[in-house]
């Protein structure tokens, strides 16, 4: 990678899975931006675990693609949030989603990219200061 990336973006497992599974969609464009050094993809340990389990169950032939990504252009991997960090968001989200959101907040990215409507439409989450966008909105920033 040459130079510093333009943005650090925390991606949800649905974005990572879709990017690996479908090489022509907008999530794949985000992975391309990461591999080209224009963005730094950030994930939590929980996101990686969820991605591996989902791919093993639904699309095991995509596991080598994930492995290649992790080997050739590894994302920044942040530790899972503390229990207190997670529970601070359980008033607005189910525990599992609160864990993902708390990880995104603690990572301090420029954007949180997700395809889950409950993150995108929850006005309380916007008060966190993190910019929550879809993969299509993120790609539009780069005019791809």
Image (cartoon, helix red, strand yellow):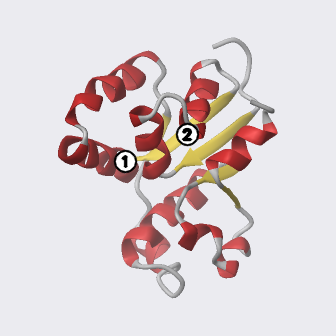
Front of the two marks 1 and 2: 2
Element on which disc 1 rests: helix
Q: List the single residue furthest toward the top.
A: 2
Please give the residue where the numbered disc 1 appears in the rendered image. Answer: 45
Q: Position of residue 32 (x, y in %)?
A: 59, 24
Q: Residues within 10 Å of mark 1 (few under 14, many from 20)?
A: some
User: Is 67 placed above or below 126 here?
Assistant: above
Q: Position of residue 116 (x, y in %)?
A: 52, 63
CA distance for labels 1 and 2: 19 Å
Q: Residues within 10 Å of mark 2 (few under 14, many from 20)?
A: many
Res 23 visible: yes
Instruction: Return the residue nearer the eye: 54 or 106.
Output: 54
User: Is 132 placed above or below 43 here?
Assistant: below
Instruction: Return the residue nearer the eye: 97 or 144.
Output: 144
Point 63% across, 43% down: residue: 9
Instruction: Find residue 29 and report its image quarter.
Output: top right
Asked if disc 1 and disc 2 are in contact, CB closer than 8 Å, the reply is: no
Point 55% across, 30% down: residue: 31
Q: Position of residue 1 (x, y in %)?
A: 63, 13
Please give the residue where the numbered disc 2 appears in the rendered image. Answer: 27
């Amino acid at each position: 990678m040459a130079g510093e990336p333009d943005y650090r973006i925390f991606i949800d497992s649905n974005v990572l899975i879709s990017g690996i599974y479908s090489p022509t969609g907008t999530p794949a464009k985000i992975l391309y931006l990461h591999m080209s050094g224009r963005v730094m993809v950030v994930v939590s340990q929980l996101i990686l675990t969820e991605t591996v389990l989902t791919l093993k169950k639904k699309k095991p032939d995509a596991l080598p693609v994930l492995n290649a990504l992790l080997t050739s252009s590894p994302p920044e991997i942040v530790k899972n949030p503390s229990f207190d960090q997670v529970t601070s968001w359980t008033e607005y989200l189910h525990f599992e989603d609160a864990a993902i959101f708390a990880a995104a907040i603690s990572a301090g990215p420029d954007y949180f990219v997700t395809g889950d409507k409950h993150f995108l439409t929850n006005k309380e989450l916007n008060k966190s200061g993190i910019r929550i966008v879809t993969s299509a909105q993120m790609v539009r920033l780069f005019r791809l």
